[in-house]
Image (cartoon, coloured by chain):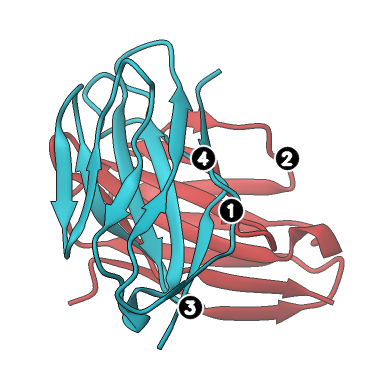
Amino acid sequence: DTAVSQTPKYLVTQMGNDKSIKCEQNLGHDTMYWYKQDSKKFLKIMFSYNNKELIINETVPNRFSPKSPDKAHLNLHINSLELGDSAVYFCASSQVNYGYTFGSGTRLTVV
Amino acid sequence: GDSVTQMEGPVTLSEEAFLTINCTYTATGYPSLFWYVQYPGEGLQLLLKATKADDKGSNKGFEATYRKETTSFHLEKGSVQVSDSAVYFCALSDLGSGNTGKLIFGQGTTLQVKP
């Protein structure tokens, strides 16, 4: 069983399109996150939800909108994709005294 | 704000060499510290962690000690293998509990081990 699963693993799309990335965790964790890894491997947090409530919203263009229908899911919707959005997006979850678990990433390429 | 600084890579070593990857941090509170490893094409795996000063985290032959006086968490391994080739990230968590806040990452250090 995959603890944190993301779909799709690869996403190639044209500029201006709208796309979504889905994330699900089966660990029962209360908190979920989206991180962006750029071409230089630098990782930066984008959003965090705790029990469906947004608790961290870093400086991210408002074209990015997270949605958490329940505490096991955190999806990321991106409008009007730009070349600079090309990156690997990681979903993660955490629980107090347990730590963090990361998904395997979604490589987004905007052409 | 809180930040993590790692030594620049890439680091290239021969098999069985000693590894040190330096990591220093800046934090206003009492963060927990982590090392993550990313193998090519894969996600992030927790390598080890330490939650308070003087704690030593260890796993798979890797060690790091939380040094509050020098604000450091250097990663060491006595004898590296080709299979250790990966990108290593030092990170801190900015909440006191250490496990529900955001992780702040260093820039990553690429390790290449040659046979």
Marks 2,3: beta carbons within 8 A: no
Alpha carbon distance from label 2 to label 1: 15 Å
Instruction: Please give the residue where the numbered disc 3 appears in the rendered image.
Output: B40
Q: Chain of mark 1?
A: A
Res. A62 mark: 2
Residue behind mark 1: A36
Q: Residue at x 41, y 68 (%)?
A: B43
User: Which chain is home to disc 3?
Assistant: B
Q: Which chain is cyan?
A: B
- B6 w.r.t. B3: above or below: below
Quote the CA–CA distance across marks 2 and 3. 31 Å
The quarter of the rendered structure image containing the C terminus of chain B is bottom left
Q: Check disc 1 and give the amino acid type.
A: Lys
Q: Which mark is residue B106?
A: none
Give the SS element for disc 2. loop
Q: Which residue is mark 4?
A: A47
- Amino acid carrying mark 2 in the image: Asn
Camera-side mark, 2 or 4: 4
Q: Residue at x 42, y 74 (%)?
A: B39
Q: In front of the other: label 2 or label 3?
A: 3
Report, in whole angstroms, how far the alpha carbon at label 1 lies from the one at label 3: 17 Å
- Mark 2 is surrounded, within 10 Å at the Cα level, by few (under 14), some (14 to 19) or many (20 or more) other residues, namely few
Label 3 element class: loop
Closer to the camera in the image, B113 or A9: B113
